[in-house]
Amino acid sequence: MRVSLIVCIAFALAACRNPPEELPEVAAPTPATEDSAAAPDAAAPDAAAAPDAAAPAPDTGAAPAADGWVKLAPPGLGFSVEMPAEPERQSSEVQGPQGHKAELVQYNLARDDYVLVVSASPLVAQLAQFGNKELALDRSLASQTDQPGRTVRYKKPITLGDAIGREAEVDMTLQGQQARLRIRLYLQGLYMFQQLAIWPVVGDAPPAPIERYYKSFTLTGDTSQSKPAIDLWQRFPAPELGLSLELPKKPEYEVVVSETFLGKATVQTLVGHTEFPPSAYSIEAVALEAEQAKRDDAAIFVDWEKTVAANSPDRKVEVLKREDAELLGVKGKLLHVKATVGKDNAEGWYHCIIERGDKPRVLVATMWALGAGAGEAEAKRFLASITREK
C-alpha cells in the first residue's frame, strides 16, 4: 500500500458535516495483549533533524524512550501520547460554519504499514457550547465514518477521565487493498481531541504499535497555549421591532401577511440560526387588528398555546412545562416543549406576551435546539437578553 495515499486521506479527516444515519452497533474487536501492544517497532526511523535555528519549531515536548518510542506532550495543548518516532507537526487556521476561526494542531507519523494522526482543536468544542455535546461528538464521528465506500465495523461511546468521547472503526478499499481506519474523539472543556490510525488489513489484529499508541493517550488538562475561547454571542439591534437582543449569529428580518392563531395578520419576524449544532432563534411580532385587540389576554394565550402544542401526522409535540413569566416587564406565558419529527427529537422554548397601547401586538420569542435535553442554557440567555431599544 502506498503510504502517501493513506496520508492524504488521514489528513483530510476532520470537520463536522451531516448528522449520522442510524447504524447497528457491533462488538468492538478484541484488543492486542499488553505484551504485543508494548512491543517496539523495530523499523522506527531516527527522529527528524533539528529545525533551522533561525525559525525554531514549536516545542512538541517529545521525550525519547529507551525502545525508540517518544512521548509527545506539546506544552499547553492538553494531551500526551506515545509514538514510534517524533511526528511531523502541522498547524492551520480553520473557520467554523458560523464564521469564527480557531487553530487546528495535528501531529502526523507515516510508516510503511500504518499512519498515525493526533490532533487538538477548540473549533468543534466551541460550537458544542451552543447545544448538545453528545450530538457534537456524533456529528464529528459521522463526518468521517458515514461516507461512500466505507463500512462501519462498530461505533461506541467512550470516556477518559471526565472527558466524553466516541470510537469507531471502518473498512475501506485503497488502491484495491483493504484498509482499516480507527477513530477516537474526546471532548473536554473547550477542546476536541482526535486520534486516527490507518493500516492495511492483514489478519484480525492491527499492528502492535497502533494498540500502544491508543493506550498511551492521556489528557493533561493544560490548554494554556490554545487560542482563548470565542464567545460567538453578540448584541444585535432590531429597530423594526423596537428591540435589542443577543444571538450567536446575525439575524434576518422580514415582514409578511399570513394566517396566524389570530387569523390573518401582519407578522414581523426576526430569525437567527446556527448550523452546528442545529438551533434556531426567532422573535415574531403579530399585529393586533381592531377586532382582534378586543379579545382579552387569557383568550389569546389559550389560542396561542393550542397552536404551539398542535400535533400533525409527522410531528408529535409534548408540553414539558408551562409557567407565568415576564418578558420586557410584561406578564406572559412561557412554554417548554418537546417535539418528535421522524427519528429526530428537539426541544423548544416559547415566551409570549401581549403588548397593549397605540400599536397592540403579540410578541413571541422562540428558541429551538436539536437533541433531547439540548438548548436550555442558550434559551435562557437568549430570552434574558431581549430588551427595548434605547
Image (tube, rainbow, N blue to C red):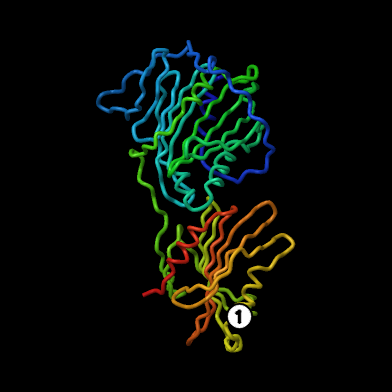
Task: Note whether residue 238 is visible.
Answer: yes
- Extreme residue toward the left, this view: 54
Quadrant in which the N terminus appears: top right
How far across and how far down the image is residue 46, in percent?
Answer: 39, 14
Name the element at disc 1.
helix
Q: Is residue 320 above or below residue 117?
A: below
Taking the spot 47% from the left edge, 73% from the top edge, the residue there is 327
| Front position in the image: 206 or 274 | 206
Give the residue at mark 1: 300
Quadrant for residue 220, please give it.
top left
Q: Is residue 376 above or below residue 276?
A: below
Taking the spot 50% from the left edge, 81% from the top edge, the residue there is 355
Task: Note whether residue 150 is visible.
Answer: no
Quadrant for residue 337, please give it.
bottom right
Taking the spot 46% from the left edge, 58% from the top edge, the residue there is 249
How far across and how far down the image is residue 347, in percent?
Answer: 59, 59
Taking the spot 53% from the left edge, 22% from the top edge, the residue there is 211
What's the amino acid at mark 1? Ile
Instruction: Name the side, left or right, on which 192 lies relative to 294.
Output: left
How far across and how far down the image is residue 254, in percent?
Answer: 53, 70
How far across and how far down the image is residue 148, in percent?
Answer: 65, 36
